Image (spheres, rainbow, N blue to C red):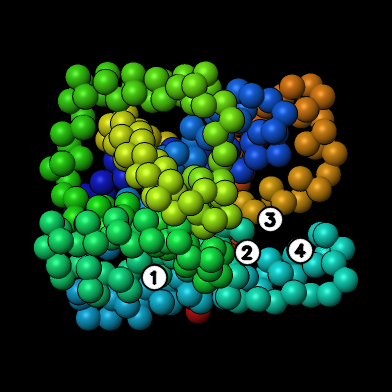
Amino acid sequence: MKERDYYFDNAKCALMLLVVFGHFLRPYIDGVLWVHSLYTWIFFFHMPAFIFISGYFAKRFYEQGYLPKIMKKLLFPYLLFQFLYSIYYFFLYDQSSLELDVLTPHWSLWFLLSLFSWNVLLLWFGRLPKWAALPAALLLGLAGGMMEAEKWLSLSRTLTFFPFFLLGFFTQKSLIERLFAVPVRLVSLAVLVGMFLLIHFGFPDLPQDWLYGSKSYDTLGVSEPTGIMNRLVIYAASLVMMFSFLALIPSRRFSFSVLGARTFYIYILHGFILKYLHETPFPDFIMDVHGYPLLLGLSIAVMLILGSQPVIRLVRPLLEWRLPKWRQTAS
């Protein structure tokens, strides 16, 4: 039996923490400069890195039954939780009518739809040599900003982030292992710190909408040539920060490594907690006491709860169409 690679579990766990933490920071970015800088810094690389890792694990796309398996894993949960979030928002926001739209993903569910699309795109791009496939994916990513589809079918994000997925698909573990050299890790740490300082002092008004990948160049208020140049700069910065972050991830097993294998659950479910808290006096409390660092502790708590065995057993039938182990044993 092949030994589990805890490096990727650790990487996914750390990235998932940044996802949750970033979402908790969102209401405060307009009022506190360093929060805005931290939020922007996180969004430069956390989703590109997640998408890169997803592409790395898509190398078996050519195997028989791979696409139906991906469809079951991604599309069915997407449709189910699109429905559940619609009901949740109906009650949470006291909406006058229940809005059901399977073509425009609710909030973070875009990732499921895009991940399915990226796997489908491998049917063509995965068979090309990487010297041809990667430039073609880059052109698609740049073209994504020219479309007005934006959040519809997550099309804009699918195209914008596809280069990271395809890069992960073509990347071998030997390349990642080169990041573990001590000099590389020291440089990587300096890069990440330097990028935060550059964002904070050099670009304090950088619009975070550029990092979501869901906006057209027109919506972002620039011409197509300017948008393409901006996107290329963002691609370059995201790529450098992504590999710098991955260089700092340890390879050995930790007590929290298990959460890396449960990020799918945490990602889909954390919106229920976050959206509820944002409708309570909680954000005002955080602002009153300047308790922004507390949000990191809250993010860790949310991960521990949603990644716990009781929650996994409860939700697994919905996400994996598998009964909990205790039910299987009982039957």
Count of numbered labels shown in the rendering? 4
Q: Nearer the viewer, residue 270 or 178?
A: 178
Question: Which residue is the site of mark 4?
Answer: 89
Q: Is residue 239 left or right of residue 108?
A: left
Give the Cα distance between marks 2 and 3.
12 Å
SS assignment at label 3: helix
Decide if residue 244 is on the left or right side of residue 293. Answer: left
Q: Is residue 4 left or right of residue 280?
A: left
Q: Is residue 114 left or right of residue 121?
A: right
Q: Residue at x 30, y 59 (%)?
A: 139
Residue occupied by mark 1: 117
Q: CA distance from mark 3 to mark 1?
A: 25 Å
Mark toward the viewer: 2 or 3: 2
Mark 3: few/some/many CA within 10 Å (<14, 14-19, 20+) = some
- For label 1, the crowd category at 10 Å Cα-Cα, with few meaning under 14, some 14 to 19 and many 20 or more, is some
Query: Which disc number belongs to residue 272?
Result: 3
- First in sequence, mark 1 or 2: give its number: 2
Q: Residue at x 65, y 40 (%)?
A: 26
Q: Amino acid at mark 3?
A: Phe
What residue is disc 2 on?
A: 106
C-alpha separation, residue under disc 4 versus residue under disc 2: 10 Å
> Quick check: marks 3 and 1 in contact, CB under 8 Å?
no
Cβ atoms at labels 4 and 2 below 8 Å apart: yes
User: Does residue 178 sit above or below 139 in this rendering?
Assistant: above
Element class at badge 1: helix
Distance from the alpha carbon under mark 1 to that under mark 2: 17 Å
Q: Which residue sits at x=52%, y=26%?
A: 203
